[in-house]
Image (cartoon, helix red, strand yellow):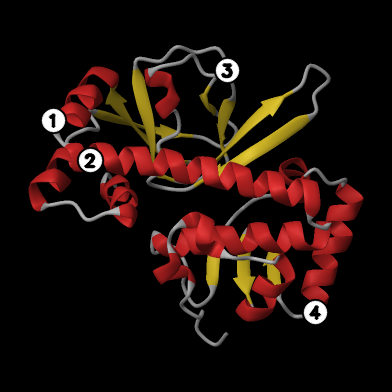
Amino acid sequence: MVTRLTANLQLYGALSGEEQQVVESLVTSTRSTVVGEDLVVEGDAPTHCRVLLDGQAFRHRTLPDGRRQIMSFHIPGDVLDLQGMFLAMDHNVTALTTGEVGLVPHARLADVLEGYPRIARGFWRTSLIEAAIFREWMVGMGRRTAYARIAHLFCEMIVRFRAMGMVHQNRCHFPITQQHLSDSLGLSAVHTNRTLQALRGEGLLSFQHGELVVLDWPGLKAAGEFDAGYLHQSEIASLSLAGG
């Protein structure tokens, strides 16, 4: 399972065999997670980083009146709280599915980052990509239509899932609800439902029972005004999905 972290870091630069072994050694313990569990809690000052080894999660803030803003979705290989090495956490990360997290002691990670510059660059790049995703979501919420926002999110997740080998025959497991979509894209539940129906009706995708199926990849990219450049995985995103 720890190889997910290695694979994630190597999306942005190859690591030597020795460096891969060092990354594999970072996780000192693991534990199982359950749906709805808070993996990262606002206000915490953790002593370990949490790496998502299996399952999915989402990053969010919830206002006092219960309104929630989801800021990103996370897949295996993602480090959920790297900022905790330097700052107290200012948001929550909640498990979307059952899964497994690995714990990386801050002291151990600091030693590795100092002693292995290419590993350090890998972690730095993952943080920069996360920031790029935040910027793209901001553009979407500020300037894209609901139709484009939903299509764009699905395109983004397909590219990210494919990079981790999690797309099979144009299908991936992405068990979000319409409420998750609404909370991530700043839409009402009614608007979200109508827009999903439109995307389905145009034969671009199927989305039910936690499974996303891309039926027309070029069409979905066009609908979402999607350019994967901000993910810096152009060699992956440029590939056509099978049959699409």
SS assignment at label 1:
helix
Which mark is first along the chain, 1 or 3? 3
Q: Residue furthest bottom?
A: 243
Given the image, on which type of amino acid does mark 3 rest?
Glu
Given the image, on which type of amino acid does mark 1 rest?
Gly
SS assignment at label 4:
loop
Q: Is residue 220 above or below residue 99?
A: below
Q: On residue 5, which mark appears? A: none
Q: Residue furthest left?
A: 18
In which image quadrant can residue 192 be found? bottom right
Residue in view at x 40 percent, y 70 percent:
235
SS assignment at label 3:
loop
Q: Is residue 196 above or below residue 64?
A: below
Q: What residue is disc 1 on?
A: 115
Q: Give the Cα distance between marks 4 and 3.
A: 41 Å
Given the image, on which type of amino acid does mark 2 rest?
Ile
Which mark is first along the chain, 2 or 4? 2
Residue in view at x 64 percent, y 61 percent:
154
Residue in view at x 67 percent, y 37 percent:
70
Q: What residue is disc 2 on?
A: 119
Which mark is first along the chain, 4 or 1? 1
Q: What residue is disc 4 on?
A: 202
Q: Give the Cα distance between marks 1 and 4.
A: 53 Å
Q: Give the Cα distance between marks 3 and 1.
A: 31 Å
Q: Give the Cα distance between marks 1 and 2.
A: 9 Å
Q: Nearer the viewer, residue 173 or 184?
A: 184
Q: What residue is disc 3 on?
A: 42
Quadrant of the image containing the C terminus: bottom right
Rendered location of residue 87, percent (x, y): 46, 15
Rendered location of residue 166, percent (x, y): 44, 63
Q: Give the Cα distance between marks 3 and 2.
A: 28 Å
